[in-house]
Image (tube, rainbow, N blue to C red):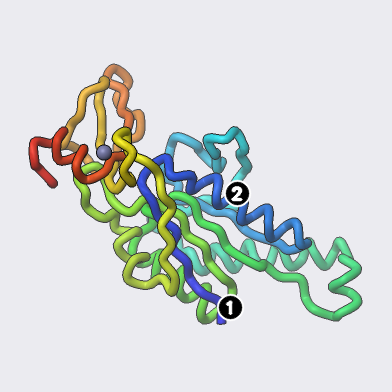
Amino acid sequence: MAKLYFRYGAMNSGKSTALLQAAYNYEERGQHVLLAKPEIDTKGADRISSRLGVDRDVDFLIRPDDDVRALFAVHRRRVQDRAEDALIPESAATGARPDVACLLIDEAQFLTPAQVDDLLRIAVTDGIPVLAYGIRTDFQTRAFPGSARLLELAHTLEELKTICRCGRKALFNARLVGGRFVFDGDQVAIDELSADRVTYESMCARCYLEESAGRLR
Ligand SMILES: [Zn+2]
């Protein structure tokens, strides 16, 4: 049975790099994958960018009101038709219909809970493995709605680790505006304030609590 995987971590834990590597591993074996991400992430537009300099266009973007399962079915059909047109020798020999081997989702924390429900249906009912990559918690240490649902539903959870400035494993994502730590504000703020640039620092619990003077949310 195909499964839903949630690979989560703090910011800068190499999630996009891991996603692109996973896509490459499938394609190296001659398999087809689909890449998607929520539209809310304005930073990369319709590309998945890794800090190592590798980047790639997504196959489709997911808007907040989109039916992810229907959207996936449209793009799955496109892959099937294109692969059949190309007359791939090995599939012609075996008679197997070319299909999507895996759906890869970047920035999965920005999906709605209902869209994450659809990811489980794509895996279990439609039989296509889904690998979702995302950040577990926001700058106030609360789970993003999409991440909360993925933690509830995923068959397999895998943590991608990164290091705090002190050397411990980073757990949280502290927000800086104009270089100063802030602990109030909207959950999503991606470079939207031009005068006071928003950045994030991945931190262990001890360093976070020091900067927040003990505050967690
Ligand atoms: Zn630390």
Pointer 2: residues within 10 angstroms few (<14), some, or many (20+)? Answer: some
- State the SS at label 2: helix
Which of 217/96 is in front?
217
Q: Is residue 4 left or right of residue 179?
A: right
Three-letter code for the amino acid on which mark 1 is drawn? Gly
Q: Is residue 164 visible?
A: yes
Residue 121 x, y percent position in the rendering: 47, 76
Q: Is residue 34 left or right of residue 31?
A: left
Q: Which label is found at residue 20?
A: 2
Residue 107 x, y percent position in the rendering: 44, 49
Q: Quadrant of residue 91?
A: bottom right
**63 over 151 or under it: above or below:** above
**169 over 77 or under it: above or below:** above
Which of 193/8 is in front?
8
Q: Is residue 169 left or right of residue 81?
A: left
Mark 1 or mark 2, which has the lower sequence index?
A: 2
Three-letter code for the amino acid on which mark 2 is drawn? Leu
From the image, tell me which residue sits under label 1.
127
**Which residue does the image show at 31% across and 23% down from the upper left?**
197
